[in-house]
Image (tube, grey):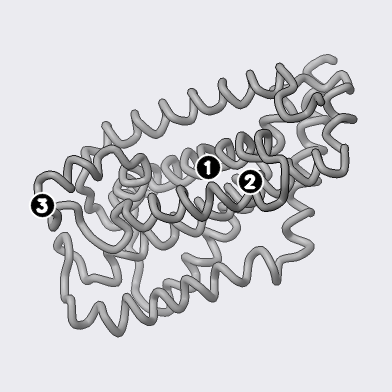
Amino acid sequence: MDLRQQYHAFKTIVLKEFLRFIRIWPQTVVPPAVTMGLYFIIFGNLIGRRIGEMGGQPYIDFIVPGLILMSVINNAYSNVVSSFFSSKFHRHIEEMVVSPTPNYVILTGFIAGGVARGLVVGVVVTGVSMFFTELRIHHFGVMLVVVLLTATLFALGGFINGIYARTFDAISIVPTFILTPLTYLGGVFYSIDMLPGFWQQASLANPILYMINAFRYGLVGVSDIPIGTALGIIIAFVVVLYLFALRLLNRGVGIRH
């Protein structure tokens, strides 16, 4: 398969993934916007007025970046894990694997679909946030790079979860018991400067902390973590997970029985 054919295969997978979630937008795009709107009302306007400022910013401005990124993380992850597991369950993936399409094109196509859903939902949630506060983007380039890398990282996580999952229940275990706790403890609602010394150090082991702080730096110019360190860690995770997911796909893990 030459490069032109690989491009058409990649475009086909991405288009399939994009149409898959956009056709059911009331189930994929609207719920995160409603949920985050409630967060903005309760934590931003009602509770935030009593808290005042955090990190030198009004509390609602402080939590907006984390809430936007949280919606990107959840949707990039859930899109890929559900799509890939459905392909396994209905045995569509076997047609792809036995075709001449290289595995890295299949993997990248699924990941691009997850990134697309994460970005669409992120843009919608950002629009909702503008009803509650006036956003002034501090560094658009940093913000864009971080959101793309984060969506890619969690789309890869969803792909790996989809490979190992054997039942529909298994695809909800990681989001429920790992992803959600790490997200809520990743500094969405507070600065780690508020924590005692031990818990500050423990928080540094949470990779989501680096993503939220780097995104917050791009949006409002505030971060608990040096931006270079945060970007380096995110890129390292993306490379490691991509190579791991590609190795699993090459070996047929979860596909060959």
Viewer-side label of 3, 2:
3
Q: Quadrant of residue 49?
A: bottom left
Crowding at mark 3 (Cα within 10 Å: few <14, some 14-19, many 20+): few
Query: What residue type is disc 1 on?
Result: Phe
33 relative position to 98: left or right: left
Q: Which residue is mark 2?
A: 114
Which is closer to the viewer, label 2 or label 1?
A: 1
* Residue 131 rendering spot, x and y as whole percentages: 43, 79
According to the picture, the residue beneath numbered tag 3 turns out to be 196
Give SS at disc 1: helix
The answer to whether residue 59 is left or right of residue 18 is left
* x and y, in percent, of residue 26 in the image: 70, 71
Between residue 93 and residue 45, name the one nearer to us. Answer: 93
Circle 1 or circle 3, nearest the eye: 3
The foreground one among 33 and 135 is 33
Assign the C terminus to one quadrant of the image: top right
> Whole-Å distance between the Cαs marked 2 and 1?
8 Å
* Residue 154's disc number: 1
Q: Disc 3 on helix, strand or loop?
A: loop
What residue is at 21 percent from the left and 38 percent from the top?
A: 226
Residue 139 as seen in the image, left or right of residue 17: left
Marks 1 and 3 sit apart, C-alpha to C-alpha, by 29 Å
